[in-house]
Amino acid sequence: MTLAAAHADTGDTAWLLAATALVLLMTPGLALFYGGMVRAKSVLNMLMMSFVSIALVTVVWLAAGYSLAFTDDLGGGLLGGLENAGMARLTPSSLHGTVPTLLFATFQLTFAIITAALISGAVADRTRFGAWLVLVPVWTLLVYVPVTHWVWGPGGWIGAKLGALDFAGGLPVEITSGASGLALCLVLGPRLGFKKDAMRPHSLPMVMLGAGLLWFGWFGFNAGSALGANGLAAAAFLNTMAAGCTGLLGWLLVEQKRDGHPTTLGAASGAVAGLVAITPSCGTVSLLGALAVGLAAGVVCSYAVGWKFRLDYDDSLDVVGVHLVGGVIGTLLIGLFADKAMTGGPQGLLYGGGLALLGRQLVAVLAVAAYAFAVTYGLGRLLDRTLGLRASEDEERTGLDLTVHAETAYDHGVLGHGAPVRKAESPL
């Protein structure tokens, strides 16, 4: 993150405005991606879990989240202060580098929004909506905000002190959401019929549309993290494109060899896996490194999504297999492929930099994953004992669309077969 400059650059500001809008679009894209992957009886609930995250995270980010993440460290590299709570001290003339601080804060807000929304895929089909309304803002303040300060905040212990590299969010976005999703899976337990009933995506066209919107928005996510309209942004943009492609191809190759059929779901998932892995490394590796990172993620994640059946945790939409595993791959491979032409100094093992950077990346991965898992597990247990985190068996069997929202996505489906309209669940 850059220090304040003397004046704003209009080109940098214009690009970051566009990038911010692109990243916000990723959350509706995620809603479609996840919505297509669930069964028809809970698709609206899945969409709502993403859309309501936009509102919930925005409120807590403006109130305190931004200040705690991006103001000067209080000591120990763990958390910032509250001097910018409520954005009270930020004016249109305040600058972060060459862009308005208000714009930088909004750009970072869109990262926080999609991170919280990502978790919903791990707990799809069985989470009480009222509990989700409490979980999202509390999780944002307890998990996302501290980790963001560690990685990008002034004096954060991972970025400023340890010296680990993360260009666009492998640690605060991908690994926190994946580890937190795993924790909540264990708290909730598996869906009814897990490993027995077919739980196929109800709309693969919706999945593909969502994946396309995610890919489109990811250019803002990664290239926007350069915070300027410059060569680094261009390199991150190209690396993002390249890794998404090799991730897609790697997943399809595994499917063809293992199952004999390359699938549309595999294509969408492979592209997302490659994009996840390149997120931390898009501004630190060369184009060749980006191709390798994407391919590794596509291949490894295609196997990782099956681990839940052997290890008996029900990660509904493969948040652990894609985002946690992909985030770990991308963050660790910086230690192999980091190029000083991109980083301005640090180099990976394959570029003559030795093992030091790889070691720092490993420490960062382990610390963030452990913290996110532990805090989320505790939070999940607390909510389960107080509000009740899991929907009732009757609600789950009928579908959350009807029982929670008193709506159905497709009138010719559930309602058309005479199912009774049930009273909507209270938000709390």
Image (cartoon, rainbow, N blue to C red):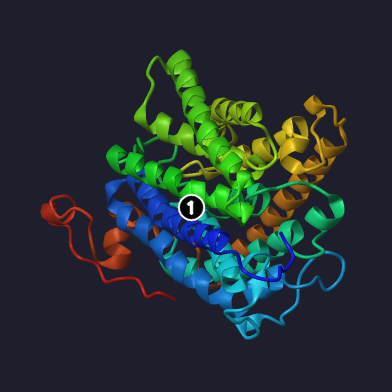
What is the three-letter code of the residue carrying label 1? Val
Q: Would you say 427 lies left or right of 405 here?
A: right
Residue 232: where, in percent of width, then height? Answer: 64, 45
Give the residue at x 64% y 59%: 376
Give the camera-side residue of 31 and 230: 230
Q: Would you say 419 lies left or right of 229 here?
A: left
Q: Quadrant of the N terminus?
A: bottom right
Dot 1 lies on which element? helix
Residue at far bottom of view: 88
Which residue was labeled with disc 1? 123
**Measured along the vertical axis of the image, is residue 282 above or below residue 106?**
above
Q: Quadrant of the C terminus?
A: bottom left
Residue 84: where, in percent of width, then height? Answer: 67, 80
Residue 43: where, in percent of width, then height? Answer: 31, 53
**Measured along the vertical axis of the image, is residue 308 above or below residue 179?**
above
Q: Quadrant of residue 339?
A: top right
Residue 363: where, in percent of width, then height? Answer: 81, 45
Q: Would you say 327 lies left or right of 120 here?
A: right
Q: Quadrant of residue 160?
A: bottom right
**Measured along the vertical axis of the image, is residue 28 above or below residue 278?**
below
Viewer can see residue 305: no
Q: How many marks?
A: 1
Give the residue at x 41% y 56%: 25
Q: Quadrant of residue 265?
A: top left
Viewer can see residue 203: yes
Label 1: few (<14), some (14–19) or many (≥20) C-alpha neighbours in 10 Å: many
